[in-house]
Amino acid sequence: MGGVRITCVGGGPAGLYFAVLARRADPSRHITVYERDRPDDTFGFGVVFSDATMSFLAEQDRETYPAILAHATRWDPITVRHGGQVLRAGGIGFAAVERRRLLAVLREQAAALGVELVFQRAVPDPRELLEGTDLLVAGDGVHSVVRAAFADAFRPRIELGPTRFSWLGTDRPFDSLTFFFEGDEHGCFGAHVYPYGPDRATFIVETDEETFRRAGIDGFGEAETIAYCERLFRGHLDGHRLLANRSSWQRFRTVRCASWHHGRVVLLGDAAHTAHFSVGSGTKMAMEDGLALSQALDRFPGHVEAALAAYEDERRPRVEHIQAMAGTSFDWWAGFRRWTAWPPERFSFHFLTRSQFRYDTLATRDPGYVASVERAADLDVRERLIAVEPAGGDLDELARLAGGRPLALTRLLPVSEDGRVSVEDGRLEDYAGLARRLPLGAQLGHAGPRGACRPRRLGLDRPLPGPEAWPLLAASALPYGPGSAVPRAIDAAGMERVREDFASAARRAAELGFRFLQLHFGHGYLLATFLSPLTNHRADAYGGPLPNRMRFPLAVLDAARAAFAGELAVAISVCDWQPGGLSEADALAAARLLRDHGADFVTALGGQTTPRAVPPYGRCFQAVLAGKVQTEAGVPAIAAGGVGGLDDARTILLAGRASRCLLDAVRPA
Amino acid sequence: MRIGIGLPTAIAGAPAALTPAWARRAEAAGFASLGVHDRLAYDSLEALTALAAAAAVTERVRLAALLVVGPLRGGAAVLARQAATVAALAGGRLTLGLGAGPRRDDYEAAGLPFARRGRLLDAQLAGLLDRLPDGVEVVVGGAADAALARTARYAAGYCHGGGSPRAFRAAAERALAAWSDAGRPGRPRLWGLGYFALGPGAAEAGRRDLGHYYAFTGAAAARIQAGLLATPEAVAAYCAGYAEAGCDELVLFPTVAGLDQVDRLAESVAQR
């Protein structure tokens, strides 16, 4: 029986690959693919697959995928050409296929399996197609007409990226995935080069908006673009040409949808989601979508809507992971002009560690490359590590940590009784003696709305029963979490007292022999509640725009700075890791203000502004925040978060993202 | 690293009476814990009820729900009472693992919105800790960042969903990073999972059962099947890999319903 009718809109990799797999799995299905263009009108030169992609598709599909890869060009290193140097990091592994070839293989297989292919047929109204079909599959790309027709259901959000790029090609032979960076009087340009044949490569030129405007590229036609880029990159082209193929200058569109399926309609590939091309995942995601959808239909025969839900459940977490990685990478491409003056080794390492790779993953693949980076940096990483006492307090462990390192910090110590998180918090005086003998730093804070809780070994932010609790303070009278006590919005007298408590604690720290001070203005504690718009709703001179929100934190810093002569760091949540939080511009401005008021370092924490924050946990997960403070705000940064050991510190420090690294208190075995 | 064994509560065709017999045998064989999974829209024993049966016939072994899909029990009150009952029957030997669960059909069967599962679990956890008796070990599982944030906020440990020792290590690194970032004292206890089928003909039956159980994961089911531990050497290597990756307690779940599986696993584990 069977005879399910499936209509695919769009004859790109997503739709065609799905059609092939679905028809092969069940030849009774009637599958029609509509493509707006002619069979060979394809754009975009070559497509890239990474090693990891290949293993997954290869495991699942033993027929079509091998046929596609039979035409692939493979290369192993990534080459970065910058500042007159050529740096190669090997062992990474990619394959590329000419897009036209990929589509030819898919079309051939689709036709052989009996899929009906209809070319030069635009779809004016997708709703009409729905009439005669059991399932409507939208693989019609970033500008999907199907998505637009059902926009109320899919709720797409399309974000225009901050860069400008043009998709070109070249006939210059390349032996690896290659990146060039060149400047002219207008600014900086980068080129992503993906070779897909002996004398063919995709050549994408990307630049920032200001450079784009200064260079007057806005009005360029194809010929002018080619001429401009050929002149810019002539040192790398060895007399070869750049080739155009509908090569206008565009801003990348990141597509996200609240849902990918609606009734009998489903989105695949770019129609559902896009990720900046610098992570090379567009075609991979499209094909994995096609595979997952085909398999889901097999699992739920006769239940199209259940199959579509299963498809989305399976694919969404993977796609969102790639989109997050691509977001970090895109951010690098939006800002690379800041780093082009760096030594080429550091620049290349910063580039390669922007989202996917770390020191250890690169060192395993290519020890020679990593050694060259380390030689050029000439940096003693151990000298820049800061350890921290276990959160529950452990003087013996602190002494051990400080014994072998240039600096170890105490756990967070309250500046006053009402600034305690719990009754088990420590006191500065506990460290008398130790601070004279060892290189110690004191961490000072005031818990604010997170005070009066049970000890944290029992969980975070569990309020003490009323009779045992003490009154709480915050910028605004907002409880930290749903079960937390409501704090009082601090008044002028309260501020004066807290300022004096910090000054007094700083003075005592100096007297006790501490050589370093870290003021904790992050994680939703008292001073953090001023910084973030999520927690500061004040209408007076301490609320509103950033300079107002910084007024009290800076007053506290001034008082502590005047009382402590040694090095001083201020820790802030550079990012709240939740919607509506501190903006990046405000975070960088805050870091500069802290420096201007005498902070030697800004420690780049994130999140915990409220319990709803969800940071992207993992190794070095906040290195990107430190990097913004250090290289964009120009303030010496201490990186923190997921720094488990030397390799993580090397990842961060060799890339120039921070001046120091704060090791996690709890580290892998 | 301690090693536990799963109860046969979610193997197709396994009789319910096998569970208490299995629990006794596993305790006698020296396993540290007895694990159960939790599903609603699947032919299986209810997780906490099965643990109550195991509690009644054992004295020493820890009883570990890995993981209970918390929101399926509504808010905190019902779940807390159920867990407190099992803990009381077991003299406190309960590990209550909680997750939002990856299966839409479970939520549909319970009449709950799958899309809100994370928020439902957060609200449940917020009310749960104050209602549980002392000594119940709360563990959280899940791969999402939100699951790691929940672990650091509420739990005493983290439970990984199964996979290679390398995958476990990567997840453990994330859990430790979250724990450290939250300023929690001590370390989270790290739990790992695996699946085994030992003895003649067991591998094929085991893989079939896993394919059935994990059909909802789509393409990932084949990978899970490929990870089935089907020889004593594979079990020993898996245990060694998990120990090296920092696992505190590894629970190996059966995929074939036969009491000989308990003995075979005990022998394989003893060989390491």
Image: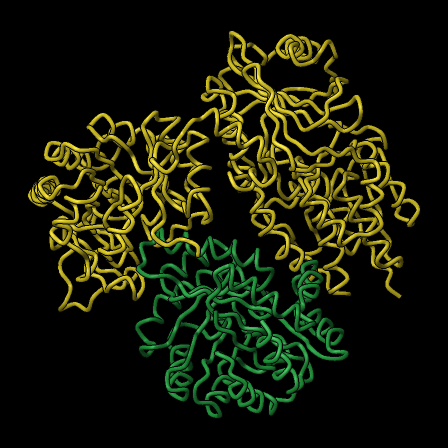
Q: Residue at x 58, y 14 (%)?
A: A218
Q: How is the image coloured?
A: by chain
Horizontal and vertical percent position of residue A234: 66, 9
Horizontal and vertical percent position of residue A404: 30, 45
Q: Residue at x 73, y 36 (%)?
A: A95
**In this picture, is A160 found above or below B146?**
above
Left or right side of A577 for B235: right
Left or right side of A333 for A513: left
Horizontal and vertical percent position of residue A154: 60, 47
Count of marks, rendered view: 0
**In this picture, is A29 found above or below B109?**
above
Q: Looking at the image, which is closer to me, A239 or A537?
A: A239
Chain ID, yellow in image? A
Left or right side of A498 for B108: right
What color does chain B have in the rendering? green
Question: Which quadrant of the rendered structure holds the N terminus of chain A?
Answer: bottom right
**In this picture, is B240 found above or below A54?**
below
Horizontal and vertical percent position of residue A545: 26, 32
Q: Looking at the image, which is closer to me, A192 or B252?
A: B252
Q: Residue at x 59, y 33 (%)?
A: A253
| Residue A533 visible within the image | no
**In this picture, is A207 found above or below B204?**
above
| Residue A52 visible within the image | yes
Question: Which quadrant of the rendered structure holds the C terminus of chain A?
Answer: bottom left
Left or right side of B51 for A394: left
Residue B204 occupies quadrant: bottom right
